[in-house]
Image (spheres, rainbow, N blue to C red):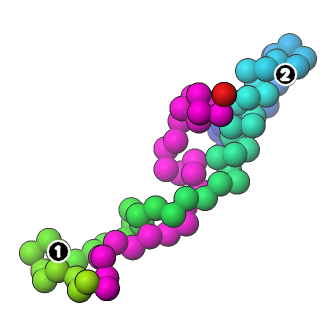
Amino acid sequence: TWICERLAEAGRNAEPGDPDLALARAAWRWLEETELLAADLDAIGPAPWDAAAGPADDGEVRVWTPAWQLGLPLGHLAVHLC
């Protein structure tokens, strides 16, 4: 991915032991390894004017999605990890 390429480039240009680069690598690793149960944005549901789903069916399809695909910015994650 482009993020891995940027991290590799940053690693070549950074001072040894750069804490910012270490945090960015840790945050990206967390985003790659974490999956969240989220609404399936690719699912096509019933039209809004169709009858509502029954009480046992909330009408929302959920799937396990890699955290990075949900657009979580690395900066936001880094703030919460500190």
Q: Which residue is mark 2?
A: 12
In the image, residue 1 sits, relative to residue 81, either above or below, namely below
Q: Nearer the viewer, residue 61 or 8?
A: 61
At 9% from the left and 75% from the top, the residue drawn is 49
Image quadrant containing the N terminus: top right
In the image, residue 25 sits, relative to residue 15, either above or below, namely below
The residue lying furthest to the top in this view is 15
Which of the 4 image quadrants contains residue 41?
Answer: bottom left
In the image, residue 37 sits, relative to residue 68, either above or below, namely below
> Is residue 6 on the magenta stretch?
no
Q: Is residue 77 left or right of residue 12?
A: left
Which of the 4 image quadrants contains residue 4?
Answer: top right
Q: Which residue type carries mark 2?
A: Arg
Relative image position of residue 33 (x, y in whole percent) = 70, 54
Q: Is residue 71 left or right of residue 12?
A: left
How busy is the neighbourhood of tag 1: few (under 14 within 10 Å), some, or many (20 plus)? few
At 70% from the left and 30% from the top, the residue drawn is 24
Q: Is residue 25 left or right of residue 63?
A: right
Image quadrant containing the C terminus: top right
Which of the 4 image quadrants contains residue 53?
Answer: bottom left
> Is residue 62 on the magenta stretch?
yes
At 90% from the left and 17% from the top, the residue drawn is 16
In the image, residue 43 sits, relative to residue 66, either above or below, namely below
Mark 2 to mark 1: distance in Å? 52 Å
Q: Which residue is mark 1?
A: 47
